[in-house]
Amino acid sequence: MGDTSLASMILDRAARYGSRRVFLRKRDHSWEDISWQQFGDQIVRAARGLAASGFQPGDRLAILADNRPEWPLLDLACLYLGGVDVPLYLTSPPDDLAYILNDAGASVLAVAGDDQRQKIAQIASEVPSLRQVIHLDTDSAPNAGLPNRLATLSLTDLLASGEHSSRPAQPASDPGLATIIYTSGTTGRPKGVMLSHTNMLANAEDAAAVLPLDEEDLTLSFLPLSHGFERTGGLYTILRAGGAIAYGGGIASLTDDLSVVRPTILCCVPRVLERVYQHMLGERESASFVKQKILSWALEVGRAAGRVRTSDTALPFALSLQHGLADRLVFGALRTALGGRIRFLVSGGAPLNADLACFFHGAGIPVYEGYGLTEAGPVVACNTPDRNRVGSVGTPLPQVSVRIADDGEVCVRGPNIMAGYYNRPEDTAAALDAEGWLHTGDIGAIDAQGFLAITDRKKDLLITSQGENVAPQPIEGRFRQEPLIEEACLIGDQRPYLTVLLVPDRAFVEIVANTHGVSGEWPDVLDHPTIRGLFQQCFETVNSSLPRHAQPRHFTLLAEPFSQASNELTPTLKVKRRTVLQTRQAAIDGMYPDPQ
């Protein structure tokens, strides 16, 4: 018999695996284990504690916390009761949090971290539905700044209140709606995606069916659990397979955490892989002449070997010899930096550069690119060890159907598809047709072997005042392939020509600047004629590969990178173009000196 709810699935595994480790948790500089039995017991106690405080089936519980064992604990306690949880992004400003809490009608909020508590203190009086705040990282329940009407308690208090209760005895058997995930998106106010237990169970079941996961696997969770990719892929799917999850210090301490945890699999986004690769390029630039040559040679050998390996053919004899030497000199150290036990990575959230994927395959670190969106639970398709084609996002999951509409739009149907957008009937009708197909807004194609390729966003087109239609993402991707460039944002909608904002890879540029004898404050380094000339060469190289109508005329180097704090990046590090148009208006206007 299949799992009937997310909570029952996890409690079943807790009974099955007992004293085995389910979580590895970082506290200061040490790590501690949490067993399946401990976790299962805590879920039941937390659920009963919530019930004792008046939490009812259908009530909303919001979670505003970093990745930690308490996050899935509160998530599953809520789901145990038939409640609906609302994950919140740590980077959301207070007004966005107030909007989401009010739109969802959240009655309980679980929060961790002084910064997040301060945000809640600012907006709590604006959220009349909120009646209780649970503090996840303290044994006391601070009430500073919160309205007196709000009940506050610590997680310790919540668990204690449920310890001696025997009700409810079982998880809700047919709980229906599980979560409302507000998509960060690249434009506009977030929309609440309604996903049921069935949606997320189907997605986890499919992912576990196509990826070789088992109870010996250990992953390091560093993408935000408030994002559907990490929640389904890095939490429910791993736990369904009986694997374990390590919670460290996030991206900030990722390098150190990898060396200690030594995970076997990872969920990641392309920017993480790009930074690993650019770090290698930086090492090359600062190395001796001989080592520079070795690293350059090894990088090319890795790409070449990866292209062969991903085509399911054996390495030619000469390339095999070169690869063996490169592995001893370079690739082994790279695998050690990732913990030394990685079996494979799953990349999602944004397009992955094919050459980058080939390099990691060649270095003995298989990367399987997938595709999805929150509205699809979120995974639609994924490459796998058995079926992998670099440059595609793989084949649809077993229970998922994909078709390409007449205009090239990717449409998806299956048990993973959302019920709709909460309180947004018009948006729901625009996204879901009468036959249950989700219209993704992505443009793609399916080849004869069933592999799906995503080529563009249907609505993310720049239309210049000259009437030229330009798809920005492929162009931005080409700029990001240049070692000097970390991020790019193409500009030109309703303007006479295209331009581009470039975010330099600071670590790499500083190494290059040092080799050219350039020093000083960061803005002065970027303005130096030598450094400016190197970027000009990159700019011309990319432009030479583009059709004339898609070539930007000017570029501006940004000394301050795009950030989540300024709302310029989504949690999966995609640029929010609409926000950038506002935050970088002066830089943009400087590239258009003539009146519009």
Image: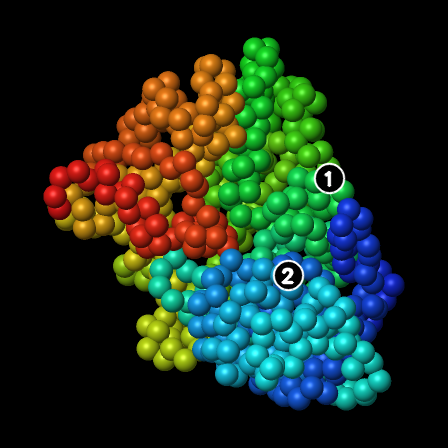
* Residue at mark 2: 113
Q: Amino acid at mark 1?
A: Ser
> Image height check: is 103 above or below 298?
below
* Residue at mark 1: 259
Rendered image quadrant of residue 177 = bottom right
Rendered image quadrant of residue 132 = bottom right
Considering only order in the chain, which callout, 1 or 2, is on the residue closer to the N terminus?
2
- Say whether residue 556 is left or right of residue 16: left
Where is residue 160? Give x, y as percent. Answer: 81, 78
> Image height check: is 40 above or below 206?
below
- Say whether residue 474 is left or right of residue 43: left
Where is residue 206? Give x, y as percent. Answer: 60, 63
Q: Residue at x 44, y 41 (%)?
A: 561
**Number of other residues with Cα within 10 Å of mark 2, as a class: few under 14, some 14 to 19, many 20 or more:** some
Q: Residue at x 54, y 26 (%)?
A: 282
Q: Residue at x 39, y 57 (%)?
A: 186
Q: Residue at x 45, y 37 (%)?
A: 486
- Say whether residue 572 is left or right of residue 45: left
Q: Amino acid at mark 2?
A: Gly
Q: Nearer the viewer, residue 394 or 578?
A: 578
**Number of other residues with Cα within 10 Å of mark 1, as a class: few under 14, some 14 to 19, many 20 or more:** some
| Residue occupying the far right of the picture | 19
Q: Quadrant of the N terminus?
A: bottom right
Q: Is residue 260 visible?
A: yes
Which secondary structure lies at badge 1? helix
Q: Nearer the viewer, residue 52 or 549?
A: 52
Where is residue 144? Give x, y as percent. Answer: 62, 71
Give the number of the disc on residue 348.
none
